[in-house]
């Protein structure tokens, strides 16, 4: 027996040796019946080789092992991973080997299962196991169906439950910020409330008390505080986008003037000056109109596309920018680099067609009625300028002067708005020492330059003779430079004078002198006044304390420690900081007046670039589709038009529009708002379920 088992254990996969289990009769060997025991179970497949070696060595070859792989992977209940196992059966003789085999199985974490010796009992157990498996499958199926029904029913209410849970958490979080008054057994909270909403809040508190059935009425009282209140600007769906542009620069301080109402008009207008094209403005207007007309269904479709959300949030800004661009495009008489002949041309030619086509040196004289009828075009530019070779020269002078005029008026508007801040905060010192010198400096220098432009346009006409002919018209830039440098202008050939009106040189010297006088006033007047005021107050306090108890004058000679400056006053360090701050502010304003005026030339530069790029795109792309006359030319024109339309929308509308938008934003933040707007406040953030739910939904998606 030992020899037979040893050979089987040495090669467990051999099928040629057979061992027959005879049940209670045992195994017959040598005419004797032997009683064999066995154990059965499952073990991890990768542990089988080590398991066999351990059985062989521990039992000295006196056991018989058979194993078979379980093809279907099983799920580990502890980890949930799929594992591969093998089933095994071990035959042995005697209780000693039985105990040793069981210990080895426990060591290898094999799972043993009871298996009766009688075939009838094994069949009965197998049938019982199959019945239990069928019962468990039935229970699992019913449980799965019930769970599916419960989840389907819960899915209908999960959104409402989510909203309720978020609201309840927000309410409890806010209630935790309240202070508990133990003596009066009530909750006390301090919060910022808009004045116009106090009655609404009182009605809401009263309605909440009635619905909850509380017998204690809520009390809402206004209280005084030394804290700086937050800034709250009421907006709607139209003004909110413009308010966001201003808030991106900085939140207004409490009661500081809000630039948004002025930005609503000035922002799209300055954009349109740079983006003046009737066709491109129409495309932008139609896109924004689609967003506005379909805003409710589009708003319901929430998307994570950041570009689309930016366009949709600024739909009213785009709408006004497109509308104003259509207006300026009509003034420039520019539509896709072409002109509209609405009222006919006011220019005429007396040459025949062959002369005009062959001679490129012909010029039209605006001073002669045969060439020009001396009547201005009703709206915008005459369409004949589209064909003129000196179109760029004419438009350069026109748009450059318009840019300076708009820029100076825009900056004057910003300086004027600072007066409202000073008047509201009752800062008379800033009105006298800051506002008035700033207005005088800006008007006497730069607004005077604007007036010279209008005087030049009115005084020097083509039909005038010397010295009022356009040849005697002085350059505005050279005149302004000579004015600031107190330099005499160089005389012009065949002209009586280089000045536009009598007394211009004396007036210019006076204006420059007064403007330069405003610089030290802005620099020193305010700090010196505050320093003298503080010194007088300090002397009064010292004299008030330097007396004896009886009020004798003898006590005035005592050395008395001066009182400490109070929190609202200016000590020596604050006076020094005030000098530094005022110096920085003055230098920034004086130098900024020059740089900011020049910065508005971007209106001219971008308008010229946009017009020239549109013209180049037409001549290099669209005109190529008109070179064929047959039916092939019609088909070819479709492809050329599609390519031209893609470049027009992609480059001229999107890229040029974004460039003009950024330049307009810069003009408002730096050139306009810097004149009156500090933006050092913080925003009022009311308790809002809408904001809380949107934040929670975003967090869940992420």
Image: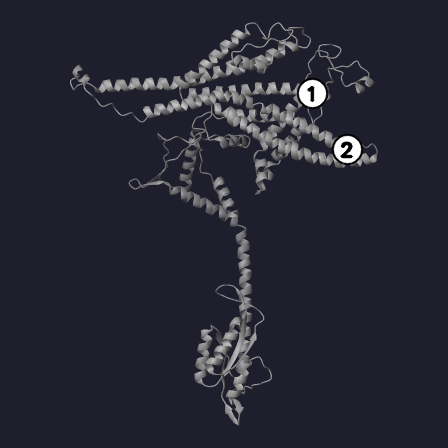
Name the residue beneath numbered marker 2: 625
In the figure, residue 199 lies in which quadrant?
top left
Asked if residue 406 lies left or right of residue 687, the reply is: right
Q: In the displayed image of the protein, which residue is found farthest to the bottom?
A: 31
**Residue at numbered disc 1:** 391
User: How far across and down, in percent of the image, does residue 146 sit?
Assistant: 54, 60
Q: Percent x, y for residue 536?
A: 30, 17
Residue 69, quarter of the rendered image: bottom right
Q: Can residue 493 be seen in this view?
A: yes
Whole-number angstrom distance, CA of label 2 to CA of label 1: 25 Å
Please tell me which residue lies in front, 638 or 194. 638
Instruction: Give the residue furthest to the left.
Output: 550
Numbered marks: total: 2
Q: Quadrant of residue 319?
A: top right
Q: Specify which label sits upstream in the sequence, 2 or 1.
A: 1
**Residue at 44% across / 16% down in the picture?**
519
Determine whether, in the image, residue 62 is placed left or right of residue 428.
Answer: right
Q: Tell me residue 34's x, y (percent).
A: 50, 90
Image height check: is 326 above or below 364? below
Residue drawn at x 46%, y 45% is: 166
Instruction: State the residue in front, 465 or 680.
Output: 465
Say if residue 324 shows up in the picture. no
Q: Which of 453 and 493 is in front in this view?
A: 493
Mark 2 in CB contact with mark 1 (< 8 angstroms): no
At which x and y percent is residue 396? 64, 20
Q: Residues within 10 Å of mark 2 (few under 14, many from 20)?
A: some
Residue located at (61% from left, 35% from top): 291
Q: In this view, does 64 lie above or below 687?
A: below
Of helix, strand and loop, which one carries label 1? helix
Residue 264: which numbered mark, if any? none
Query: For the residue carrying disc 1, how many other residues have a C-alpha within 10 Å: few (<14), some (14-19), or many (20+)?
Result: few
Numbered disc in front, either 2 or 1? 1
């Amino acid at each position: 027996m030992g020899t037979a088992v040893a050979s089987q254990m040495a090669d467990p996969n051999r099928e040629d040796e057979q061992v027959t289990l005879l049940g209670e009769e045992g195994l017959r060997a040598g005419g004797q019946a032997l009683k064999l025991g066995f154990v059965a179970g499952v073990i991890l497949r990768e542990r089988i080789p080590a398991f066999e070696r351990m059985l062989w060595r521990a039992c000295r070859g006196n056991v018989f092992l058979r194993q078979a792989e379980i093809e279907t992977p099983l799920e580990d209940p502890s980890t949930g991973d799929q594992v591969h196992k093998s089933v095994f059966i071990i035959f042995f003789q005697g209780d000693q080997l039985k105990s040793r085999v069981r210990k080895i199985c426990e060591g290898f974490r094999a799972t043993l299962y009871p298996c009766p010796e009688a075939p009838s009992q094994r069949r009965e157990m197998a049938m019982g196991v199959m019945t239990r498996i069928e019962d468990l499958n039935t229970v699992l199926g019913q449980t799965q169906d019930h769970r599916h029904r419960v989840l389907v029913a819960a899915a209908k209410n999960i959104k409402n439950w989510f909203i309720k849970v978020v609201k309840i958490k927000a309410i409890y979080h806010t209630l935790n910020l309240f202070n508990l008054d133990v003596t009066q057994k009530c909750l006390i909270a301090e919060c910022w409330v808009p004045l116009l909403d106090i009655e609404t809040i009182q009605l809401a508190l009263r309605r909440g008390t009635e619905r909850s059935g509380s017998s204690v009425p809520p009390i809402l009282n206004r209280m005084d505080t030394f804290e700086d209140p937050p800034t709250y600007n009421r907006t709607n769906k139209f003004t909110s986008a413009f308010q966001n542009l201003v808030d991106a620069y900085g939140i207004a301080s409490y009661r500081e003037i809000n630039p948004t109402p002025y930005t609503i008009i000035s922002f799209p207008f300055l954009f349109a000056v740079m983006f003046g094209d009737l066709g491109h403005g129409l495309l932008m207007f139609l896109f924004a109109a689609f967003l506005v007309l379909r805003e409710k269904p589009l708003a319901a479709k929430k998307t994570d596309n950041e570009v689309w959300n930016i366009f949709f949030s600024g739909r009213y800004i785009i709408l006004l920018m497109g509308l104003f661009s259509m207006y300026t495009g009509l003034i420039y008489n520019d539509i896709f680099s072409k002109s509209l002949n609405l009222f006919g041309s006011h220019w005429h030619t007396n040459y025949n067609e062959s002369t005009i086509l062959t001679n490129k040196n012909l010029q039209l004289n605006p001073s002669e009625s045969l060439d020009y009828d001396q009547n201005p075009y009703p709206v915008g530019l005459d369409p004949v300028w589209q064909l003129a070779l000196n179109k760029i020269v004419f438009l350069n002078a026109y748009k450059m002067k318009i840019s300076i005029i708009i820029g100076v008026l825009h900056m004057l508007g910003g300086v004027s708005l600072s007066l409202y801040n000073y008047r509201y905060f009752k800062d008379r010192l800033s009105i006298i020492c800051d506002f008035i010198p700033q207005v005088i400096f800006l008007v006497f220098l730069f607004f005077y330059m604007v007036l010279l432009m209008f005087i030049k346009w009115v005084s020097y006409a083509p039909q005038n003779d010397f010295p009022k002919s356009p040849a005697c018209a002085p350059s505005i830039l050279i005149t302004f430079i000579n004015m600031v440098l107190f330099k005499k202008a160089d005389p012009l050939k065949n002209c009586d004078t280089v000045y536009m009106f009598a007394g211009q040189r004396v007036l210019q010297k006076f204006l420059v002198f007064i403007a330069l006088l405003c610089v030290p006033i802005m620099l020193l007047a305010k700090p010196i006044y505050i320093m003298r005021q503080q010194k007088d107050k300090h002397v009064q306090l010292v004299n008030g304390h330097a007396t004896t108890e009886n009020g004798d004058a003898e006590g005035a000679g005592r050395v008395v420690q001066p009182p400490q400056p109070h929190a609202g006053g200016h000590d020596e360090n604050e006076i020094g900081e005030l000098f530094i701050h005022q110096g920085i502010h003055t230098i920034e304003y004086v130098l900024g007046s020059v740089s900011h005026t020049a910065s508005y030339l971007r209106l001219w530069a971008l308008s010229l670039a946009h017009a020239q790029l549109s013209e180049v795109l037409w001549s290099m792309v669209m005109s190529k589709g008109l070179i064929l006359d047959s039916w092939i030319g019609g088909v070819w024109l479709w492809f050329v038009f599609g390519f031209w339309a893609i470049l027009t929308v992609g480059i001229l509308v999107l890229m040029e529009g974004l460039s003009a938008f950024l330049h307009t934003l810069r003009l408002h933040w730096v050139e306009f708002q810097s004149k009156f707007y500090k933006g050092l406040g913080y925003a009022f953030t009311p308790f809002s379920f809408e904001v809380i739910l949107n934040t929670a939904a975003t967090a869940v998606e992420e």
